[in-house]
Image (spheres, rainbow, N blue to C red):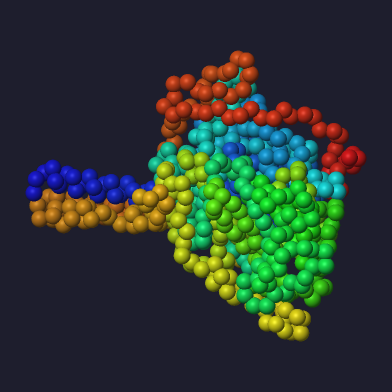
Amino acid sequence: MPGSTILTLFSSCLFSCALAGIEPQQAVWTSAAIGPDGPWNAVEVSVGGQANIGLFPGRLWSTFVTTTDYCAVNSTIPHCGSGTYDKNNASPDTATGTALTIVWQPDDQQLSEGIEVLGTAPMRLDSIDLHFGLGAINNHSLALIENDSQMYEYPGGTRYPIFTGCLSLGATDRYQVFTGGNGGTTINATMIPWYLKDQGKTASSSFGLHIGSAGPTATMSGSLLYGGYDRNRVLGIVLAFDGDLWSFIRLQDIGIRVIDGASPFTASSSGSGAISNNNITGLLAQGNSSITSAGLSVLIDPCSPYLTLPKSTCDAIASYLPVSYNSSLGLYLWNTSSPHYSRIVASASALTFTFMGESNAQTGTINVPFRHLNLTLSPPFTDTPVPYFPCFTGGTGQPVLGRAFLQDAFLGANWEQKKVFLAQAPGPNIPSGVDAVNVQPGDVTVAASSNDWKKSWEGFWTALSAEQANGNAPVSVSVSSTPTHTGSSGQRGSSSGSGSSNGAASSAGVAGLSTAAVAGIAVGAAVGGMAVVGAAVLFWCRRRKLVGQAAPEAAPQPPPVPPYCDTKDAFTGWMVEAPDNTRKVHEMPPPEMVYEMMGDQPNGPVGWGAGVAR
């Protein structure tokens, strides 16, 4: 056999091995759920080489973290159970970025768009380890929650502590660029998905997220992959939007749908929603003439907990439910003594959200079963646990769909194409494995699985009989066992696939060796010495693939752009492009002017200050 042919086949095998190492990186989820208004699934990370902390995944650009100083304000209030970051134990280090000083401080409102958040967050750089088995990622930007001016404020004026931070999912730019305090240098902060792509660990700068549910009635693990997504978490129509996580999408309507069995919903005495085949529509605009048929612009924010909507919309939905409005919290409490309560929360029914795609001809509907809308308020919101319906009338006036919605929605993005994806997520009955799929750099959509959404809920809701719906037969609100690990699994790596030629990702392509490689090994066996080389390469490829699914060895981290450079805009003092870099570093828009807050102390739970009148 000609030497050139053997060399070609040998190179083909090595190329297949290289592909086998590029796969989505799967986050590890905390063993316990988090939050006094959920509970919620959270991702486990280590910041600055310290003990693990739990974070909600979902922030753009920086990661927000609570500090030990913040939790020391009043340790009697249960608000730091997810762990904290101790900035005082982070030694100055130019490798991790802690030696650098960042001037800019973001408004804490960026932490959670669906609730009013007070204060501003000091910034710093440090390492972050997401337990991919690849080692820590240096120079990641952290927004610190560290003093008692940083609080949630609810409609009644009561202020509550921030319970946990939020993990960055990246951004469209490769770096977050700041002006530093050390001589005004420009500082480049590392974005997690871009770092993984640039280190050759993932196919693209992208992510796929399904938060799932930590509630006891229909528990479902979370799923977060950088560089791809779990196709088992994507069902039906996939809507794609231009922009990022701070871009608005169009919500056309909200309704109530009975999927199976008789309807537990009675005609509302105050509502005017259209009822057809036991389904109710028109709830978004009911009682609000300012909401037209075009719908409402909303944000999707995994760092916000509720369905933050106009009060007219929440009231329209609530008119079909046994709930009462708590004006201080801006939330609706379930009346558990009502016979309608158990029928509704156990039934095969859902709250529906219909969105318009970028093309006006395309719409998609996300179903959120009422099994997932029976959440729990705990201290410090209430003295004892209280079931509540998560429609929220507070916030800043911007409608936001948060974690209550994302229990049943898939959210993803390809930052390289500036595309955001939204689709229906399944119920608890899904395949046990992770169907990890690479998102390729050019992909403008993702491929859904063929799984049936209704079947994914079988056994977790009740198709009511007519007697049960009418109250002539009992309905029990069954509770699934609380999991000991609310996550996809502790796996650190998974099988993955390459993108298909039509732009949608597929899972075929890297499961094994190419045909050429196999042929090369077979032919090489006939030429003596090449048989040994070919067999060794084949064994190495397969061995590397198996090891990669467990815990890949930590890779070195040569930064493609230095963490700081001596370039500054002398006129504005804001961030500028770093010169002479291989990859262009884009400027970020300057932040809003930050003003001082009125008052000296927050107004909230005992121990957080007497507060001031508003």
Residue drawn at point x = 57 percent, y = 67 percent: 428
Viewer-closest of 612 and 537: 612
Q: In x, y percent, where is residue 388?
A: 76, 62
Q: Is 200 located above or below residue 212 in the figure?
A: above
Relative horizontal placement of residue 603, taking residue 447 as reference (left or right): right
Q: Is 374 located above or below residue 529 in the figure?
A: below
Quadrant in the picture for residue 510: bottom left
Residue drawn at point x = 56 percent, y = 32 percent: 176
Give the farthest residue toward the top.
570
Quadrant of image for the C terminus: top right
Q: In x, y percent, where is residue 144?
A: 67, 37
Q: In x, y percent, where is residue 363?
A: 57, 55
Q: In x, y percent, where is residue 458?
A: 57, 74
Residue drawn at point x = 66 percent, y = 50 percent: 294
Residue drawn at point x = 86 percent, y = 34 percent: 599
Viewer-closest of 464 and 88: 464
Q: Confirm whether residue 54 shows in the render.
A: no
Q: Confirm whether residue 245 shows in the render.
A: yes
The image shows a total of numbered marks equal to 0
Q: Is 574 located above or below residue 176 in the figure?
A: above
Relative horizontal placement of residue 234, taking residue 106 as reference (left or right): left
